[in-house]
């Protein structure tokens, strides 16, 4: 069986981040604005010189069995958050 995986078309990708400099408590809350997240990290580096961040990306993945979904344009609804 062949499968395909990708981000569910009804979901958003989010990113959160934290500075990896020892003792720095800077964090970025999860956001769907990826460009704003990049800018926030670059601004933090400009102010502090801290160059390294841990980033976490999250999305809702949709796996489809290709042969079962041929000819189906509809996407299943997003599951309820846990």
Image (cartoon, helix red, strand yellow):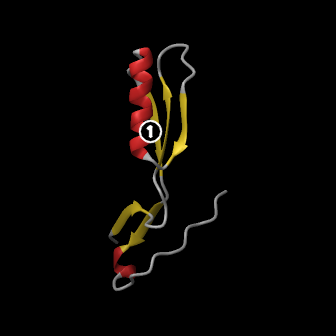
Point out residue 33 in the picture as x, y percentages from the top left corner.
45, 47
Residue at left offset 44%, top offset 39%: 37
Residue 37 appears left or right of 30: left
Which structural element holds mark 1? helix
27 lies above or below 6: above
Residue 69 sits in quarter: bottom left
Point out residue 67 in the picture as x, y percentages from the top left corner.
34, 79
Residue at left offset 45%, top offset 24%: 44
Number of residues whose C-alpha sits closer than 10 Å to that of mark 1, classed few (under 14), some (14–19) or many (20 or more): many
Point out residue 81 in the picture as x, y percentages from the top left corner.
64, 59
Pointer 1 residue: 37
- In this view, the residue farthest toward the bottom is 71
81 lies above or below 58: below
Residue 71 appears left or right of 33: left
**Quadrant location of the N terminus?**
bottom left
Residue 38 sits in quarter: top left
Residue at left offset 47%, top offset 21%: 20
Number of marks in picture? 1
**Quadrant location of the C terminus?**
bottom right
51 lies above or below 12: above
Point out residue 23 in the picture as x, y percentages from the top left corner.
55, 13
Who is closer to the viewer here, 7 or 38? 38
């Amino acid at each position: 069986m062949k499968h395909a995986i990708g981000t569910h078309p009804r979901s958003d990708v989010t990113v959160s981040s934290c500075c990896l400099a020892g003792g720095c408590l800077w964090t970025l809350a999860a956001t769907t604005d990826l460009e704003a997240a990049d800018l926030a990290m670059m601004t933090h580096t400009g102010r502090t010189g801290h160059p390294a961040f841990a980033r976490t990306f999250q999305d809702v993945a949709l796996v489809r069995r290709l042969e079962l979904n041929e000819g189906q344009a509809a996407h299943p609804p997003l599951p309820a958050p846990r």
